[in-house]
């Protein structure tokens, strides 16, 4: 039988990762809109592409830190597509 604390941790996990109640409070209000968009078959906003574009900035920061904090170009989706097509 699981102890009470173990059950609480299991309730606050997504894909095996612990999440805080504060994180759930931030995400929970968005769930009905997300489900409604899926039900309508509409495109969501922000899109995966939007998220990918935003993620390029912290990626450049990590690359910059790894090279002694030198100026590092933020790659665009076009750069990635071109690199993939030529490899």
Image (spheres, rainbow, N blue to C red):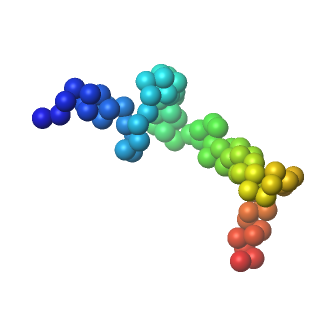
Residue 73 placement, left or right of 11: right
- Residue found farthest to the right: 71
Residue 25 placement, left or right of 78: left
Task: Identify which residue, 70 or 10, lies in the foreground.
Answer: 70
Q: Position of residue 60 (x, y in %)?
A: 76, 52
Name above or below for residue 53 compared with residue 25.
below
Q: Residue at x 71, y 51 (%)?
A: 62
Query: For the N terminus, which image quadrant?
Result: top left
Q: Residue at x 63, y 36 (%)?
A: 45
Q: Residue at x 43, y 24 (%)?
A: 21
Q: Position of residue 19 (x, y in %)?
A: 44, 33
Res 56 visible: no
Q: Position of residue 50 (x, y in %)?
A: 68, 44
- Residue found farthest to the left: 1
Q: Position of residue 72 (x, y in %)?
A: 83, 54
* The quarter of the displayed image where residue 9 is located: top left
Name above or below for residue 82 compared with residue 38.
below
Name above or below for residue 2 compared with residue 21.
below
Task: Identify which residue, 34 or 39, lies in the foreground.
Answer: 34
Task: Identify which residue, 82 or 67, lies in the foreground.
Answer: 67
Query: For the C terminus, which image quadrant?
Result: bottom right
Q: Residue at x 22, y 26 (%)?
A: 4
Residue 36 placement, left or right of 44: left
Res 79 visible: yes
């Amino acid at each position: 039988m699981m102890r009470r604390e173990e059950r609480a941790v299991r309730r606050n996990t997504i894909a095996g990762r612990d999440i805080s109640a504060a994180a759930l409070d931030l995400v929970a209000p968005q769930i009905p809109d997300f489900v409604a968009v899926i039900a309508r078959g509409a495109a969501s906003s922000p899109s995966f592409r939007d998220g990918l574009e935003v993620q390029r900035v912290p990626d450049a920061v990590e690359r910059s830190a790894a090279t002694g904090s030198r100026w590092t170009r933020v790659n665009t989706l076009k750069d990635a597509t071109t690199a993939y097509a030529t490899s």
